[in-house]
Structure formats: C-alpha cells, structure tokens
Amino acid sequence: MHISISRASLLQQVQRCQSIVEKRSTKPILCNLYLKAEAGKLEIMGTDLQMGISAVIETDVIDSGETTVSAQKLFEIIKELDAEQDIELKLEASFLIIKSGRSRFRLSVMDAKDYPGIPADDTDMNFELDSQLLANMIAGTAFAMSNDETRKYLTGTLFEIHPIYGFRMITTDSHRLALVEQALDGSHDAVKCIVPRKTVLELRKIAEEFDGLIRLSLGSRQIRLSCGGYTLSSKVIDATFPAYEEVIPSDNPRDVEVPCKALDQCLRRSMIVANEVTHDVRLTFNNTGLQVAAHNTDQEQAEEFVEADIQGVETMIGFNGRYLRDVLGVMDTDKVHINFRDELSPVLLTPTGDAKAKYVVMPMRI
C-alpha cells in the first residue's frame, strides 16, 4: 500500500472512524483502524464489534494494499502534522510509514485479514431523511435516555416507522419521555428497533457534519446509515421498549401556555437554592399566573413569577427542575403548552405550533 493524500481529508475521516474504537481491548486489533487502498480510493474502517463505521475517500493510490494500524496513534500524528502539507502513507514490511514535509513516523501494523470489519446489511427497510432534520430529532430526544444499565432497553432510543405518523424517535428514563416524529413520503412497513446510546450520538455527529440526504436502514437486529462516503452499521438492543403511547396523556383538562424562555430563566434561578440531589421545584398555577418556588434544608428559598393566562382551580405541582429545563432547552419555540390534570398525574409539554414533538414529565411529591 502506498498513497498520497491531503492532510485535511485524511484527518476528518480518521477522526470520525477512530471515535468509536476502544482505546483498550482484550483483542488488540480492535484498537486499530483498517486501511485499504485501491482504484483511486482509500477506505478507513473502525469497529468495536457492536458498531462499525467506514469512510471512503478519493485519493492518489500509487500501490494498492491493506493493513491495520493503531487508531489513537494515527489520529494523534495526523492531527499534529503541518496542515499545508500532503501526507504519504506507505506500507513497508510490518510497518506503516507516515511522511509529511520533513516529518517521518513508523508505526507497527497488524494483519488486515484478522480485522472483523462491518457486518453485511441485515436490515428490513430504508428511507431518506435530511441530515439536519435527523440531527434535530436526535437532539430533541437524546437527553431522556436512561443511564441505568440494569434496564438496558431504556439506555437507547426507539427508532420506529409508524404506519400513520411516519418516522418516530422515543426515549424515556421512566421519569420523563421525549417523542419527536417526522412524516415520510410514500408508504413504509412498520419497523422498530432500540438503538444504543453510543450509536445514537455517532449518528448525530455525522448528521451535523453532513449536508444533504441521509439513508437510514432499520431492522430487528441492525441499523445502518449511509451518506457522503460514510457507512455506519450497528447492532440494536435486543429488548422490548415500553408501551410509550400509554404514558402520553390524551385527556388532560388543563392547558396553560407559558413563555418558554421566561420559564427556563425562572427555573434556572430557583434551582440555585433547590435541593442539590432532587432539584425539586414547585409550580403553582393560579389566576394571577405561574409561580415557581424552591427551598432547601437550610431554609433558603427562591420565589419567581411568570405571567400567563391561567383559568381554573389553583394547582401546585412538584417537579425535578432539571427535567423541566432539559425539555425547555430543546424547544425551538417562543411558548410552551403545559397540559395537566392534577398534582400527581403525568404532565404533557408541547412546543406551541409544533405538533411533531411531545414531552412527558412525571411530577414528584414535595
């Protein structure tokens, strides 16, 4: 293998592929990136056996060949090289030679035949989605993924093709739920899978960097993404996601519209004196508006007020303030609808004018 390539192109692709590679592994080759040069193209691949990503770049191939080399060392070297100089990669015996200007490095390699690679496509259906729309959908739901490894099915995001609503993403940690949906052109068979957290975050990174249509393929055992020379493949979580539609309130009688930014600012200030563990705040809905209050065991208090047109009996509801702020933080809207029944029932929050996003937050006793 012998190629010449621009430093900018190589750095971008190596950075993306090495991000999923484990720095330490019982199988040393899994700490490596796979490099294959042929027919004017360089393919770079990284995997942790659960997820794999491949990037293809057009380049000047002097001699074709393949090898694997330390992902971390390759990335660190390329990152520090002169941005104005092209990079030459050449395989010599059991080493990869890296040249740029007057810099020269020699890294040991491992046989490419032992590299596991990316599994073959095992998905059931595919569709295309704008990259920024995909990034926004992930941003609007990722915060509600659970960190509880004892309930693995909650640590990822449910990707679902719904026959009526189109493409949906749903996350929940049992205290709150986030749902974002997007209509799709044409008809699609119903498919759902739970995508692991690490994969979800990689999908978001790629979607944010890429400008154009992304092809997503879903199946019961695998999810794949394809765009701009990238192919990402990941196993999905083998479990059943909770019946989330049963959690979303559909008949709450009270609906209050509140300025989103003003409420978030009140919550941020109130949480300065709230309990550092529970972050509990009290929202009081009455005829004068919305009152936000917090206190702690040192008898410190905070009281805030948000103007709102509220009709009906006074209602006090306790919340984890951080959960509310997480929801408000992903809403790109001036106002938010707070839909509730009483102080102990699930509360539904929706952005004004956006029927594609729904957020449920469970109240807490204060």
Image (tube, grey):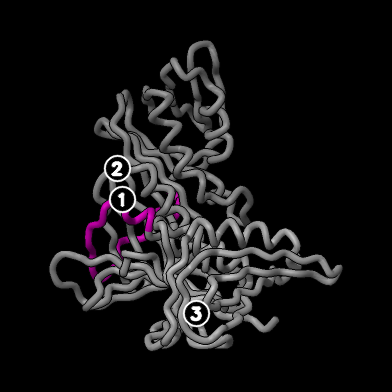
Query: What separation in Å lies between label 3 and label 2 (alpha carbons)?
Result: 36 Å
Q: Secondary structure at mark 2?
A: loop
Residue range in magenta is: 113-136
Q: Quadrant of the N terminus?
A: top left
Q: For the residues marked 2 and 1, what is the alpha-carbon distance in whole angstroms?
A: 6 Å
**Which residue does the numbered mark 1 point to in the structure image?**
131
**Amino acid type of disc 3?**
Val
Q: Secondary structure at mark 1?
A: helix
Q: What residue is at 49 percent from the left and 79 percent from the top?
A: 347
**Quadrant in the rendering for residue 365:** bottom right
The numbered dot on residue 211 is: 2
- Residue drawn at x 39%, y 65% as measured from the top left: 351
Q: Residue furthest front?
A: 288
Q: Find out whether the residues at labels 3 and 2 contact each other: C-beta distance under 8 Å.
A: no
Q: Which type of secondary structure does the marked residue at label 3 adopt?
A: strand
Which of pointers 1 and 3 indicates the residue nearer the eye? 3
Residue named by callout 3:
347
Between 281 and 187, the one lying in front of the other is: 281
Q: Residue at x 20, y 76 (%)?
A: 189
Amino acid marked by disc 2: Asp
Q: Position of residue 269 (x, y in %)?
A: 66, 57
Q: Callout 3 environment at 10 Å: few (<14), some (14 to 19), or many (20+)?
A: many
Q: Are marks 2 and 1 in contact (CB under 8 Å)?
A: yes
**Spot occupied by residue 154 in the image (x, y as percentages of width and height):** 52, 75
Q: Nearer the viewer, residue 192 or 352?
A: 352
- In the displayed structure, does residue 317 sit left or right of residue 50? right
Whichever of labels 3 and 2 marks the residue nearer the N terminus, that label is: 2
Residue 57 or 135: which is nearer the viewer?
Answer: 135
- Quadrant containing the C terminus in the rendered view: bottom right
Q: Is residue 174 visible?
A: no
Q: CA distance from mark 1 to mark 3?
A: 31 Å
> Badge 1 local density, few (<14 within 10 Å), some, or many (20+)?
many
